[in-house]
């Protein structure tokens, strides 16, 4: 009987230890479920990549269109012109996107003979992951061609310029996005420093799907 009592005591001890271990592991499981739910709630799921949470990684092509307005110079009135842009870049999963871009900034009477501005720039954009829509900030700089209409035809003057932009985008699945961006440009114009403000809508495609390995 003493041996039976000892066996029962050992079994009771093992059961108690097993219960304690299960109770200690329960908070970890609950924490993982809570983190997963929060991640889905704030929009992390659409941006999941093969390397973990974040944006889908890969080369991107972006096209944007909108309007640009050079700031009034002297007594001349500025005119709103069509703004158009194309961007090639590489988006990393953490939201950083270095790129090269071409921008047509529209026309204005604040320049000589209704000139227009064509910018070929390099820059970078950083988008905040895990938010929908996802806000971003971008900076860019490079040569700007001031195309001036003269009696002998268009003449391009090479100038310098740069811009800062603020906007937001929303993912349509893993590899497509739509967004809005506002940009503030500074250009070394023919009559001194020229400021241009613009607003554009854009669509972008991420070609990372072409480089995925496996499923």
Image (spheres, helix red, strand yellow):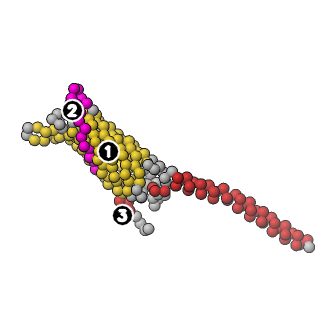
| 4 horizontally vs 183: left or right | right
What secondary structure predominates along the stretch shown in magenta? loop
Instruction: Return the x and y of residue 119 as percentages of the image width and height.
Output: 25, 43
Q: Range of the magenta residues?
A: 72-86
Q: Toward the viewer: 206 or 20?
A: 206
Q: Disc 2 on helix, strand or loop?
A: loop
Q: Nearer the viewer, residue 208 or 172?
A: 172
Q: Farthest residue to the left: give it.
A: 152
Label annotation for residue 14: none
Identify the residue position indicated by label 1 in the image.
200
Residue at 30% from the left image edge and 37% from the top image edge: 197
Q: Residue furthest right?
A: 1
Q: CA separation, marks 2 and 3?
A: 46 Å
Q: Which residue is mark 3?
A: 210
Q: Nearer the viewer, mark 2 or mark 3?
A: 2
Residue 125 located within the stretch drawn in magenta: no
Quadrant of the rendered image containing residue 82:
top left
The crowding category of the residue bearing disc 3, from other C-alpha atoms within 10 Å (few below 14, some 14 to 19, many at least 20), is few
Residue plotted at (46% across, 61% down): 50
Q: Which element is circle 3 on?
A: helix
Give how far across and how far down residue 155 sits, in percent. Answer: 13, 40
Q: Position of residue 189 (x, y in %)?
A: 22, 34
Mark 3 or mark 1, whichever is nearer to me: 1
| 57 w.r.t. 215: above or below | above
Residue corresponding to mark 2: 110
């Amino acid at each position: 009987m003493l041996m039976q009592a000892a066996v029962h005591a050992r079994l009771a001890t093992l059961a108690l230890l097993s219960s304690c271990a299960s109770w200690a592991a329960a908070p970890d499981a609950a924490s993982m479920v809570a983190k997963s739910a929060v991640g889905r709630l704030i929009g992390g799921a659409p941006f999941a990549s093969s390397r973990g949470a974040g944006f889908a990684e890969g080369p991107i092509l972006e096209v944007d269109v909108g309007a640009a307005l050079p700031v009034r110079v002297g007594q001349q009135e500025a005119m709103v012109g069509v703004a158009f842009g194309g961007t090639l870049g590489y988006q990393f999963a953490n939201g950083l996107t270095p790129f090269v871009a071409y921008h047509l900034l529209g026309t204005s009477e604040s320049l000589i003979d209704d000139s227009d501005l064509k910018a070929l720039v390099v820059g970078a954009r950083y988008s905040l992951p895990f938010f929908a829509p996802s806000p971003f900030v971008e900076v860019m700089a490079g040569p700007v061609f001031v195309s001036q209409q003269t009696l002998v035809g268009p003449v391009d003057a090479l100038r310098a310029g740069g811009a800062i932009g603020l906007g937001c985008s929303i993912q349509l699945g893993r590899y497509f996005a739509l967004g809005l961006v506002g940009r503030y440009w500074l250009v070394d114009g023919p009559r001194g420093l020229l400021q241009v403000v613009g607003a554009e809508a854009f669509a972008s495609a991420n070609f990372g799907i072409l480089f995925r390995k496996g499923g």
